[in-house]
């Protein structure tokens, strides 16, 4: 695994160098988060990873739900693309995510305020 500083910090305050060559299990990610748990409604992020590798196509998920260890829920805008070697063979997944939780909360606040304004004007 190769990651940027923000992702490494997300994974328990690590540095990117500490994560080189490790997989999700080495980093202590629970199996049901990695592989999924249908009984709990958890898809597991490896489902998308496998689809990208096997289908050799990108996946876009604008509302990827992530449960943080502290119990908070965050929403990520996620793109996953096939990572290819020099010959064009898929060798992994390139994932790019942005935490959009605060933006979505702000948008909802604006919507609610707009609704109140409309009701008040009637």
Image: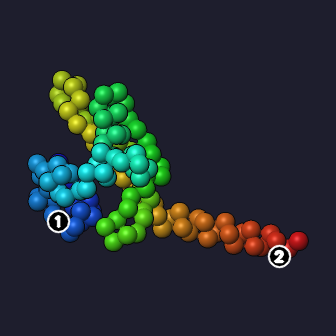
Can residue 78 be seen? Answer: no
Q: Residue at x 36, y 48 (%)?
A: 37
Crowd tier of the residue under label 1, counting other residues whose Cα lies within 10 Å: few below 14, some 14–19, many 20 or above: some
Which dot marks residue 46? Answer: none
For the residues labelled 1 and 2, the Cα–Cα distance comes to 50 Å
Which dot marks residue 120? Answer: 2
Can residue 37 be seen? Answer: yes
Query: Does residue 59 appear to the left or right of 25 in the view shown?
Result: right
Q: Quadrant of the C terminus?
A: bottom right
Q: Residue 40, image x and y in percent?
A: 41, 52
Which residue is labeled 1 in the image? 14
Give the quarter of the image for residue 54. Answer: top left
Query: Does residue 113 appear to the left or right of 108 in the view shown?
Result: right
Disc 1 secondary structure class: loop
Q: Residue at x 33, y 71 (%)?
A: 70
Seen in the picture, residue 45 relative to 16 is either above or below; the reply is above
Extreme-bottom residue of the structure: 120
Seen in the picture, residue 92 relative to 109 is either above or below; the reply is above
Disc 1 + disc 2, Cβ < 8 Å: no
Q: Residue 27, image x and y in percent?
A: 17, 57
Query: Does residue 40 appear to the left or right of 109 in the view shown?
Result: left
Which of the pair 92/46 is nearer the observer?
46
Q: Residue at x 56, y 69 (%)?
A: 106
């Amino acid at each position: 695994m190769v990651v940027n500083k923000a992702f490494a910090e997300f994974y328990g305050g690590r540095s990117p160098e500490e994560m080189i060559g490790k997989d999700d299990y080495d980093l202590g990610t629970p199996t049901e988060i990695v592989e999924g748990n249908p009984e709990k409604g958890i898809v597991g992020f490896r489902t998308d990873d496998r689809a990208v590798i096997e289908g050799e196509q990108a996946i876009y998920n604008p509302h990827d739900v992530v449960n943080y260890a502290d119990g908070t829920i965050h929403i990520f805008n996620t793109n996953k693309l096939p990572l290819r070697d020099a010959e064009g063979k898929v060798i992994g997944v390139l994932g790019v995510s942005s935490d959009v939780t605060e933006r979505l909360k702000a948008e909802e606040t604006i919507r609610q305020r707009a609704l109140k304004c409309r009701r008040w004007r009637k």
